[in-house]
Image (spheres, helix red, strand yellow):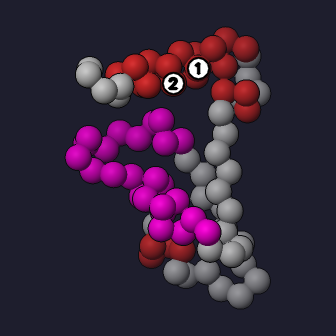
């Protein structure tokens, strides 16, 4: 991510998109997509947009599936599990 972002030139724009719920790295390894938000948050000219289940523009059942996975993930990572 750093290598890509440090190549931006004058007048250029870059859009990086991804889904942090679909990262298949080993659990001990963090995704550059999540790390870059921590590093660059608050820098003028850099914006982060986080989309949720309401932003799914496919069939309603896809919204329900996304929401079910989100709920499951919250339960699976809750303290005491």
Number of labelled discs?
2
Residue labelled with disc 1 = 67
| Residue 28 falls within the magenta-colored stretch | yes
The boundaries of the magenta stretch are 19-42
Which quadrant: the C terminus?
top left
Task: Provide residue 25's location: percent of width, then percent of height.
Answer: 31, 44
In this rendering, the answer to whether 41 lies above or below 54 is below
Question: Which residue is drawn at the image coordinates 73% and 27% (left, top)?
Answer: 54
**Mark 1 touching mark 2, by CB under 8 A?**
yes
Is 11 placed left or right of 68 in the picture? right
Task: Provide residue 67's location: percent of width, then percent of height.
Answer: 58, 20
Question: Which residue is drawn at the image coordinates 48% and 68% (left, top)?
Answer: 39
Where on the picture, by quarter, is residue 74? top left
In this rendering, the answer to whether 46 lies above or below 63 is below
Residue 21, numbered circle: none
Dot 1 alpha-carbon crowd within 10 angstroms: few under 14, some 14 to 19, many 20 or more: some
What secondary structure is found at the residue carrying circle 2? helix
Is 46 placed left or right of 80 in the picture? right
75, 7: nearer the viewer: 75
Task: Provide residue 16's location: percent of width, then percent of height.
Answer: 60, 58
Where on the picture, by quarter, is residue 15? bottom right
Question: Which residue is drawn at the image coordinates 26% and 41% (left, top)?
Answer: 27
Using the numbered discs, state the Cα–Cα distance from disc 1 to disc 2 in whole angstroms: 5 Å
What secondary structure is found at the residue carrying circle 1? helix
Instruction: Name the outermost residue toward the bottom.
Output: 10
Where on the picture, by quarter, is residue 57? top right
Residue labelled with disc 2 = 70
Question: Which residue is drawn at the image coordinates 71% and 88% (left, top)?
Answer: 10
């Amino acid at each position: 991510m750093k290598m890509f972002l440090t190549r931006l030139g004058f007048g250029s724009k870059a859009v990086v998109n991804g889904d942090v719920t679909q990262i298949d790295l080993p659990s001990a390894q963090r995704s550059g997509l999540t790390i870059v938000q921590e590093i660059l948050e608050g820098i003028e000219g850099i914006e982060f947009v986080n989309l949720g289940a309401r932003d799914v523009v496919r069939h309603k059942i896809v919204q329900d599936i996304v929401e079910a996975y989100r709920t499951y993930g919250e339960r699976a990572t809750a303290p005491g599990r």
